[in-house]
Image (tube, helix red, strand yellow):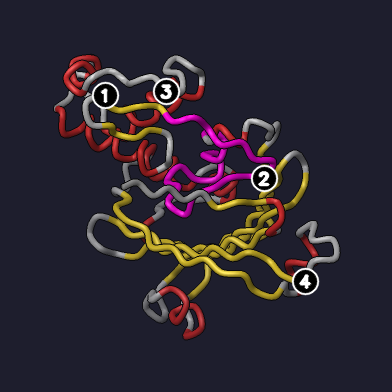
Amino acid sequence: MPKKLYTEIYETLKREIHTNVYQPKTSLPREEDLSARFDVTRNTVRRALKQLQEEGLVYAVKGRGVVVLEPVHSNRVVFSANNSEGFQGLRSFPQNKFIQELDTDVLNFKEVEVDEKIANLTSFNIHDKAFYLERLRLFNGKGLAIDHSYFRADALSGFTREDAQGSVYQYIRDNELFKVAAQRSLSSVVSADQRDREVLELGDMNCVGSLTKFVYTDAGSLFEYTETRYVPNNFSMLGFQYY
């Protein structure tokens, strides 16, 4: 079989954990067996297992191998600041099985010239071109989050509003534009502004959660700035610490 990247192995094992191919409190196959199954080195398998562990799905137990942990149930949308799969990646969390529909409404899409305000947010160079995207995220038909994003225009050749409706990361992969290498995230709670009140189902809440991420290429260049503003009582951020 063709060689697989560690992300593909991670996604396969994650799917198999969620569908109980590997049940809680049982062990995954040994590294050498996974290496043979996917026709990759053991180091590639370790990277996939490390990502599963960082999401709290498995844990390496001395003498027992990699054990599948019992899931934690929640009635909120669970997300991770380190999610590299985009909006649709929320489906991969077992706690989010209650979500029937995930939709995106592109409220704003335009190419802009980077001014001082945008440069201060993103570190893009003044007078460079950037795509500005405003995307409302709908969960079972409810507007619970909105993304405000700037992308370097020269990094997304041929990018259109229709592409923005889907996954930007999938567009990058499909067109083999570059490798997404790293992400820095900041999380806080801020006062709701007029736009939040217009598009989000805040009820009587006067604040929103704010997750800001800065995403880099493997050349060290920042290509994305996104602030996601969301209804706080509908979401829980997932963290996992191992000892």
Indicate the amino acid at tag 4: Asn
Kindly identify which numbered label has been placed on residue 76. Answer: 2
The residue where tag 3 is placed is: 25
Mark 4 element type? loop
Q: Earlier in the sequence, mark 2 or mark 3?
A: 3
Residue 27 x/y as whole percent: 34, 21
Dot 2: few (<14), some (14–19), or many (≥20) neighbours within 10 Å? some
| Residue 110 placement: quadrant | bottom right
Q: Earlier in the sequence, mark 1 or mark 3?
A: 3
The residue where tag 4 is placed is: 206
Q: Earlier in the sequence, mark 4 or mark 3?
A: 3
Chain part drawn in magenta = 69-92
Task: Between residue 114 and residue 74, name the one nearer to us.
Answer: 74
Q: Spatial distance from mark 1 to mark 3, Cα to Cα? A: 11 Å
Task: Name which residue lies at 24% across and 55% down.
Answer: 218
Q: Earlier in the sequence, mark 1 or mark 4?
A: 1
Which is in the foreground here, disc 2 or disc 4?
2
Q: Are marks 2 and 1 in contact (CB under 8 Å)?
A: no
Indicate whether 16 appears above or below 107. Answer: above
Q: Spatial distance from mark 4 to mark 3, Cα to Cα? A: 42 Å
Indicate whether 85 appears above or below 32. Answer: below
The residue where tag 1 is placed is: 64
